[in-house]
Image: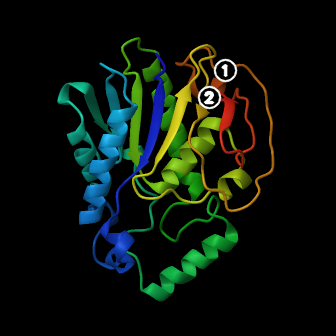
Amino acid sequence: MRPRLIILVRHGQSEANVDISIHRWVPDHKIKLTKVGVEQALEAGHRLNKLLKPDEVVQFYVSPYLRARQTFENMSKALDKRRWKYCEEPRLREQDWGNFQGPPEEMARIKMERKSYGHFFYRIPNGESGADVYDRISTFQETLHRAFASPSFPSVLVIVTHGLLSRLFVMRWFHWSVEEFESLNNLCTCEFVIMEKNQETNKYKLTTSYNIEAEAGEEFSSEDVMEDASESDEQSLNSSSLSVNEVVKENLND
């Protein structure tokens, strides 16, 4: 059964959010939360708890990166241990920047190039492009659709991941264009993106807004919502979407 809520959560403030040079000697997957990040994650757990109905169970999918796992660990402290399930999912890892990062001047050049070229198609040297990450998010969503076929799937799904991953997740789910994706600002640390299911149509809408850098053009399609969750990617192309620059996206299906 499709969950009532799908909630994307960016990890809490990390050491690299405070001092980006840490990437030169600490592997990205080993970067920890700061004290502020831990507090953010604890507060996010209380926010999540307020969204739950009595007796609802939460299914967590979490990036294997340390900062994401620490975010989950602190969020879960606000929840009864009987009310959540945990799954570590490598496909939710951060965009690969190519092992240890270079000197500040080199990284500044790469980021300027990426901004000019576009975050989606620009391939980081020895790393991934946004399009590469989109592909693994697509296979993860196929896995989710198969999992939703189970009548015992929990009614709330929480995905603890990274900023770019969150943007690409909603881009893939709602079939937004590359231009719409490029218009999205990154999430703040421990910010939620909430997708709520319409119980009558079985379709999702965003109940939280994304910050937009610029006007995004409208792109419409209108097909039926996916009927068989096990027939993932081919049928998931069926969607109806509204412009990303609307504050609340109505009647958007998978």
Where residue 209 sits in the image (x, y, percent)? 60, 46
The answer to which quarter of the image holds residue 17 is bottom left
For residue 38, the mark is none
On screen, residue 27 versus residue 198, left or right, reads: left
Residue neighbourhood size for the residue with mark 2, other residues' Cα within 10 Å, grouped as few (<14), some (14–19), many (≥20): many
Asked if 216 appears above or below 247 in the picture, the reply is below
| Residue lying at 20% horizontally and 25% vertically, measured from the top left | 82
| Residue lying at 36% horizontally and 14% vertically, measured from the top left | 152
Q: Quadrant of the C terminus?
A: top right
Asked if 24 appears above or below 7 in the picture, the reply is below
Residue in front for this viewpoint, 192 or 183: 192
Residue 64, can we see it?
no
For residue 225, the mark is 1
| Residue lying at 51% horizontally and 34% vertically, measured from the top left | 141
Asked if 26 appears above or below 128 in the picture, the reply is below
How far apart are the two marked residues, 2 and 1, measured between alpha carbons? 6 Å
SS for tag 1? Answer: loop
Mark 2 and 1 residues: CB-CB less than 8 Å, in contact? yes
Q: Amino acid at mark 1?
A: Val
Where residue 151 sits in the image (x, y, percent)? 41, 11
Where residue 216 sits in the image (x, y, percent)? 76, 53
The answer to which quarter of the image holds residue 99 is bottom left
Q: Amino acid at mark 2?
A: Asp
| Residue lying at 20% horizontally and 30% vertically, measured from the top left | 80
Query: Along the polypeptide, which appears first: circle 2 or circle 1?
Result: 1
Q: Which residue is mark 2?
A: 254
